[in-house]
Amino acid sequence: MTKISTQVLICPNCQTKTTFKKYDSINATLEPKLKEQLLTGELFTFTCPDCQTKATVLYDLLYTDVKQKLLIQYVADEKNLAQARQNISQALLAAHQLSDQDLLADGYEIRYTADPGALREKIMLRDEKIDDRIVELMKYILLTQQEIDYDQVLFERKAPGQLELVATKGDQIIANAPFSYDFYNELNKMFASHLKERPSNVDQTYARKFYTN
């Protein structure tokens, strides 16, 4: 179910006070428009009604897609990740008498992240039926082979069938690595026997541990 709260914000440009909608949770299956607004960044964008100044406003959001069997808890402050995981587990038990393991057994993937880029990425990967664990391993290979100064590496889908990893520094693209579904499928086969674990935190820390353990 989609839940909305509000917050009064002051425009940094003209000081106008405006009520801003925050989507505490969204159900992408029931409201696909909100999913698109999340992918474009609109849900995290404040627009002043007077001077049209735009600003990014990050807040905690629970994303659920029943059709894709995906649950992602995004938290704006990384320090709250552990508490968010506990809150979700308690909510599942209270509302549905379900545990995290019950959802996993039913084919769901559960993710927790404090990175808005990763939130968007994991939604797109699930739509493409691409395992985000494989993508994090691909990123690790890319970053260890190239000495680049980067802030972030994320999956992008430029067009149907046109997939790539994009490294950015600030607003600048500094490297990219296109890949095909065939290449992804080969990696998936290669790593399949090693991917029994289904962690809820899938990022470069996960990839580093995978390669070094």
Image: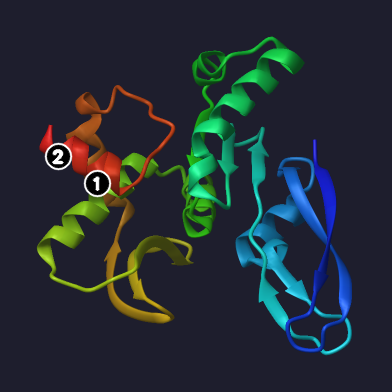
Residue at the location (78% across, 79% down)?
11
**Label tally:** 2
Image location of residue 122, percent across then percent down: 48, 48
Q: Position of residue 148 (x, y in %)?
A: 19, 73
The disc at residue 211 is 2
Instruction: Please state which of the two labelled residues, at mark 1 or mark 2, is closer to the viewer.
Output: 2
Which sits earlier in the primary sequence, circle 1 or circle 2?
1
The quadrant in which the N terminus is found is top right
- Viewer-proximal residue among 120 and 191: 120
**For the residue labelled by badge 1, is the local secondary structure a helix, a strand or a loop?**
helix
Disc 1 vs disc 2: Cβ atoms closer than 8 Å? yes
Instruction: State the residue in front, 133 or 50.
Output: 50
Which disc number belongs to residue 174? none
Q: Nearer the viewer, residue 185 or 97?
A: 97
**Cα–Cα gap, marks 1 and 2:** 8 Å
When the figure is inspected, residue 83 is found, relative to residue 20, above or below; the finding is above
Left or right of 98? Residue 150 is left
Q: Is residue 178 above or below residue 38?
A: below
Amino acid type at mark 2: Tyr
Query: Residue 21's x, y, as percent?
Result: 82, 58
Q: Looking at the picture, does residue 192 appear above or below residue 98?
A: below
Residue 81 at what x, y percent from top left? 51, 39
Q: Is residue 122 above or below residue 45?
A: above
Q: Please tell me which residue is depicted at 33% across the width and 52% down the height of the picture.
A: 181
What crowding class fits label 2: few (fewer than 14 Cα within 10 Å), some (14-19), or many (20 or more)?
Answer: few
Image quadrant where residue 169 sits: bottom left
Asked if residue 134 lies left or right of residue 159, the reply is left
* Mark 2 secondary-structure assignment: helix
Return the mark for residue 137.
Answer: 1
The disc labelled 1 sits on which kind of residue? Leu
At horizontal 58% and vertical 40% (from top left) the residue drawn is: 73
Image check: 134 left or right of 7?
left
